[in-house]
Amino acid sequence: MATSVEQKQKIRDVVLTHAHLDHIAGLPLFIDDLFANLNEPVCVHATSEVVTVLERDIFNWSVYPRFSELAGRHGAVMKYQIFEAENSFTIKNLSFKAIEVNHKVPTVGLIISDEKTTIAMTGDTAEMDKFWDAANLEKRLDAILIECAFPDELNDLAHISHHLTPKSLHAEIAKCVHLDCPIFIINIKPMYRERVIKQIESLKIPNLAILEVGAVYEW
Ligand SMILES: [Zn+2]
């Protein structure tokens, strides 16, 4: 969760794609930081599998307090809202479609829309079809965010950990019918960032860019 202090003060809904540590590591301290000043609970939206992991392995009193059972001055500080893969849910003016993708643990990609804009985000994944089937059903997409964790030479590691490389990313993008839609690469493993970017650039896909962590994007 690459958020500024100002953003933290405003965020009250968090959507999780899966329970891997690099996707939830910011959550315990995010709630801890806000604890004293919350006048409404932070709502964590996740599948039941993810909530089970959070309660069992993170918010278990040993690793961190079970915030779902704690109250601050103004009441509850954290609550869960469970969604199921292949279903839709809404948060304020945003609608979300959750689609199961191909990762080592239960993981969803998300298609997120308001009245005028729709973006699709894969979450962590290897090769997948269901996500593209859902994305291709949309009339138009304003952006696609897709992972590319490892460089091509670590294809074996990408395969066993269910991630993409620039080569497999290229094959995934070919499944998308929204040909001119801007595509942003997310979730590059920091250790391999430069190598992955170089290999992605050599694919020469004109509508593709690397998403900058911490930058604000508006679609
Ligand atoms: Zn993961």
Image: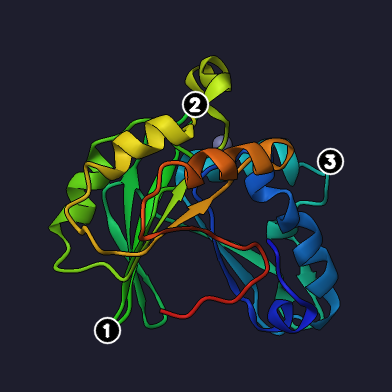
Please give the name of the residue rendered at 67% of the width and 43% of the height, measured from the top-left corner.
194
Give the answer, above or below, for where 190 lies relative to 177.
above
Q: Earlier in the sequence, mark 2 or mark 1?
A: 2
**Looking at the image, is mark 3 or mark 1 earlier in the sequence?**
3
Mark 3 to mark 2 CA distance (whole Å): 23 Å
Residues marked 3 and 1 touching at CB (< 8 Å) = no
Dot 2 amino acid type: Lys
Q: Residue at x 84, y 41 (%)?
A: 63
Q: CB under 8 Å between callouts 3 and 2?
A: no
Against 8, is 158 above or below?
A: above
Residue shown at the point (53%, 43%) measured from the top left: 18
> Tag 2 or tag 3, which sits nearer the N-term?
3
Q: Which mark is residue 63?
A: 3
State the residue position of label 2: 104
Three-letter amino acid code at the position of disc 1: Lys
User: Does any atom of ligand 1 lie closer than 8 Å to the CB of label 3?
Assistant: no
Q: Is ligand 1 less than 8 Å from the beta carbon at label 1?
A: no
- Left or right of 33? Residue 111 is left
Label 3 crowding class (10 Å Cα cut-off): few <14, some 14-19, many 20+?
few
Q: How crowded is mark 2: few (under 14 residues within 10 Å), some or many (20 or more)?
A: some
* The C terminus lies in quadrant: bottom left
> Left or right of 42: which side holds 119?
left
Q: Residue 116 carries which label?
A: 1
Name the disc covering residue 81, or none: none
Q: Which amino acid does label 3 sit on?
A: Val
Label 1 secondary element: loop
